[in-house]
Image: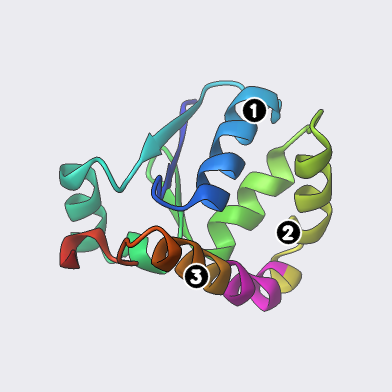
Amino acid sequence: MLKTLVYDGGCPFCKAFALQSELKGGIPDLLIRDGRLEHGLRNDLRQRGFDLSEGAVLMDGDRIWHGSEAISVLCSQLKPSDPLLVLLNGLFRDSKRARFLYPGLLAARQLALALKGLTVDPDRA
């Protein structure tokens, strides 16, 4: 089954994680979509209660995970060959630890976007 990770392509950390997950994560059929560029997708997710400005989204058929849950589920499925993914897999595959650490990722994202002159919410640019 095709899994889809929707991430914020404006964030260099998010982009690096998404691209590494796709290329070296060992998850077959993982589709990566830049939610910052895809207004229709972003709007559809927001209408369903998943705000991309509050975290990444992982979709697998009818199942959708958001924020720390999305990263935890994705990390639990990784078979990483990349050192960064090995580290992130160890940190975020446990859902309790992911919930604890995820606000730090959001803060780093917010800082990175601010340094690039981008808003956290692309719909409010």
Q: Residue 80 location in percent, x, y?
A: 78, 33
Tell me where residue 43 sits by quadrant. bottom left
Residue at 63% of width from left, 23% of height from top? 23
- Mark 3 vs mark 1: which is more N-terminal? 1
Location of residue 17 with respect to 13 vertically, above or below: above
- The quarter in which the C terminus is drawn is bottom left
Local SS, label 3: helix
Precedes in sequence: disc 1 or disc 2: 1
Query: Where residue 112 appears, x then y in whole percent?
Result: 49, 62
| Element at label 1 | loop
Quickly name the residue at label 2.
92
Region of the chain picked out in magenta, as a range: 98-105
Q: Any magenta on residue 32? A: no
Q: Who is closer to the viewer here, 28 or 115?
A: 115
- Residue drawn 23% across the image and 61% down it: 46
Quote the CA–CA distance across marks 1 and 2: 16 Å
* Amino acid at dot 1: Ile
- Residue occupied by mark 1: 27
